[in-house]
Amino acid sequence: MAAVSGGGVLPDFEVASLADLGIVVAPPLSEGQVQPASLDVRLGTRAHRLRSSFLPGAGGRVSDFLDALCMHDVPLDRGAVLEPGAVYLVPLLESLRLPPGMRARANPKSSTGRLDIFARLVTEAGEAFDEVAEGYEGPLWAEVSPRTFPIVVRPGSKLVQVRFTKGGRRVLDAAEHRALHAADPLVNGGADGAVGEGVTLSVDLDWGPGVAGWRARRHAGAVDVDAVATLDPLDFWEPVRPGPGGIVLDPSEFYILASRETVRVPVDHAAEMVPFDAGVGEFRAHYAGFFDPGFGHGAGVASRGVLEVRPRDVPFLLRQGQSICRLVYERMAATPASPYGTRSNYQGQGLRLSKAFRPLPAA
């Protein structure tokens, strides 16, 4: 197998080679685990129920914190329910031996974020969640905290995805974002002129007869994270009706909303959703931020950005068309062999819940 090439985010065929190269150390990769610009990592056989979240910090070992913080272990072999409000640390089946010049970054998968699951990657000596330092050698853990629904997980469940970068991150600057947008429009509609240090997205609160979005029902049943199109959405979600000025976000609730803009990611770039500006409102607009090469790209696949919104501290009035987050783009090391396509779960999406649920009713 040839060595990994080029600078930028590694594409699917190079990600698939990392196991052969001994960079990803794991049982054989499963079907669908390699994405156009990332690797889905898998939960192991047990979860540690913790008293609190933590970061090991420089020189710190995860095992030392587990001795102090672990309340009990939860075997996952037959499937297990992880409860809302609790914090779990789950060893992953994958570990890493990154060579010099290669680093990695993690995000929750789209379906993870849409279920209001707070999931973050932890490494030995880690000083930040979701960041894997250049040359890191060691195991990986997922910190998992369901916020609304109890969730059913098992060994092999995939909640987090990892992007590998060689030669440093190559996030576009303002001029490069504008040039790429001029050559191959990155967004259409809404605030599509707001391209600079990324691409601004605004919120659409008009999705049909009186529907602005969907709010999670509290005290609903458990959601199996590996399910596909099996659950009735109305058992878990209720429609949000807009008022004259917009919708009032309640700090105790979780919402699925969507952007006014359709989003496009060229096949030689990847994108990530990041906070717009804490000054524009007291809410978090996303959990899962990775957008794959090819998302929304091609005829007839106009795709909105889905927003996983949880307010902070105080009720907040969200207006139609209000700027809510932005996308930043970075270069791929090479074009993926299989970009995000028409068979992907969220291509061509509008206001879309997690893939676990059957299609939403019209209103």
Image (spheres, rainbow, N blue to C red):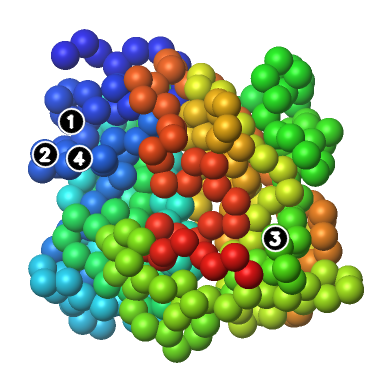
For label 1, the residue is 19
For label 2, the residue is 28
For label 4, the residue is 31
Residue at position x 73%, y 49% in the image: 260
Residue at position x 19%, y 65% in the image: 154
How far apart, in angstroms, are the residues tagged by discs 2 and 4? 10 Å
Q: Furthest-bottom residue in view?
A: 219
Residue 26 x, y percent position in the rendering = 14, 41
* Camera-nearest residue between 156 and 63: 156
Determine contact: label 2, label 1, CB under 8 Å: yes
* Left/right of residue 85 with respect to residue 243 in the rendered view: left
- Residue 155's place in the image compared with 196, above or below, is below
What is the quadrant of residue 13 in the picture?
top left
How far apart, in angstroms, are the residues tagged by discs 3 and 4? 35 Å
For label 3, the residue is 207
How far apart, in angstroms, are the residues tagged by discs 2 and 1? 8 Å
* Left/right of residue 291 with respect to residue 161 in the rendered view: right
Mark 3 Cα shell of 10 Å, populated few (<14), some (14-19), many (≥20):
some
Which one is earlier in the sequence, the residue at label 2 or at label 3?
Answer: 2
Determine contact: label 1, label 3, CB under 8 Å: no
* Camera-nearest residue between 236 and 193: 236
Mark 2 Cα shell of 10 Å, populated few (<14), some (14-19), many (≥20):
few
Q: Nearer the viewer, mark 2 or mark 4?
A: 4
Q: Which mark is residue 318?
A: none
How far apart, in angstroms, are the residues tagged by discs 2 and 3? 43 Å
How far apart, in angstroms, are the residues tagged by discs 1 and 4? 14 Å
